[in-house]
Amino acid sequence: MQPRPTPDFRPLGRKAYGSIPHLPGSRTGPADRHLSPALARLCTERTRDARDSVVVLEKLDGSCVAAARVGDSVLALGREGRLAAQSPNESRRLWAAWVAEHSARFLAVLQPGERVVGEWLALAHGTRYALTHEPFVAFDLMRDAERLPWHELTVRLGAGGFVTPGVLHEGGPLSIDAAMTRLQAGGFHGATDPAEGAVWRVERREGAGVRVEFLAKYVRPDKVDGSLLPENTGRPAVWNWRPVSGVPSP
């Protein structure tokens, strides 16, 4: 019998997803960093040339999670890279159960060594959602530190029928004000509180291919992280989605 992995075990030997730097004026926390002014201008003012392309997506407010293919198995991970099934957090365990239930869909998308990363919206963190789709929204497909460009990503995810974030803009740069104006109606995913913000993906065409240069994000300044979590409110958890069956034990 194989020994049970320790709570700190990371199957990939690394985090499942890193942090995205902030654009100027974005609300930041103590561990956050801002994008350099030169790179921020590529997102919002002027690209280098016609080979640059900017995709702006709605930023969702849940838990960043990943599903990684190791051989013919799919592992549900938290952002830090640990097994979600062993988490003391109920929402993370629900993610693990959901991945197990939908493993065939993940296997249809992922090659060994790849992982899909997205937002798990089951538990309301600081934004409530009246979801009209499943509780997972996929926004990246990665191998090690490399991510697929947006159009390739959406084609691959389509094989599994996964939801992706609402697109605010594709083409040249887009100002922060313009992006936030397009989110005023609550965004694309049923937010009943103000939408959190947006993510800019700067990609560059190289020959016949496209490379993701970098990502940046903007979070509205009045956003309070975790304002609905029970550990912060002293009140019961607010759920955007829960399964009909029971919650798995860690």
Image (cartoon, helix red, strand yellow):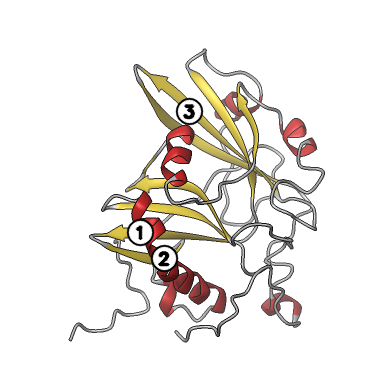
Query: Which residue type does callout 1 highlight?
Result: Ala
Residue at the image point whose x is 32% and y is 72% from the top: 9
C-alpha separation, residue under disc 3 versus residue under disc 2: 27 Å
C-alpha separation, residue under disc 3 versus residue under disc 1: 24 Å
In the figure, is residue 197 to the left or right of 100?
A: right
Marks 3 and 2 close (CB-CB < 8 Å): no
Upstream in sequence: badge 2 or badge 1:
1
Nearer to us: label 3 or label 1: 1
Q: Secondary structure at mark 1?
A: strand
Which percent across, then down, holds residue 201? 54, 34
Residue 14 seen in the current view: no
Mark 1 Cα within 10 Å, few/some/many (few <14, many 20+)? many
Quarter of the figure with the C terminus: bottom left
Mark 3 Cα within 10 Å, few/some/many (few <14, many 20+)? many
Question: In this figure, which residue is indicated by the disc labeled 2?
Answer: 77
Q: Is residue 188 above or below residue 214?
A: below
Question: In this figure, which residue is indicated by the disc labeled 3?
Answer: 203
Is 30 or 68 nearer to us in this picture?
68
Which percent across, then down, holds residue 145? 35, 45
Question: In this figure, which residue is indicated by the disc labeled 1?
Answer: 68
Residue at the image point whose x is 46% and y is 61% from the top: 79
Q: Is residue 10 above or below residue 171?
A: below
Indicate the quadrant where residue 156 lies.
Answer: top left
Indicate the quadrant where residue 29 lies.
Answer: bottom right
Marks 3 and 1 close (CB-CB < 8 Å): no
Query: Which residue type does callout 2 highlight?
Result: Leu
Query: Which residue type does callout 3 highlight?
Result: Glu
Q: Residue furthest left?
A: 1
Which percent across, then down, holds residue 113? 27, 52
Residue at the image point whose x is 36% and y is 74% from the top: 8
Q: Secondary structure at mark 2?
A: strand
Q: Is residue 70 above or below residue 36?
A: below
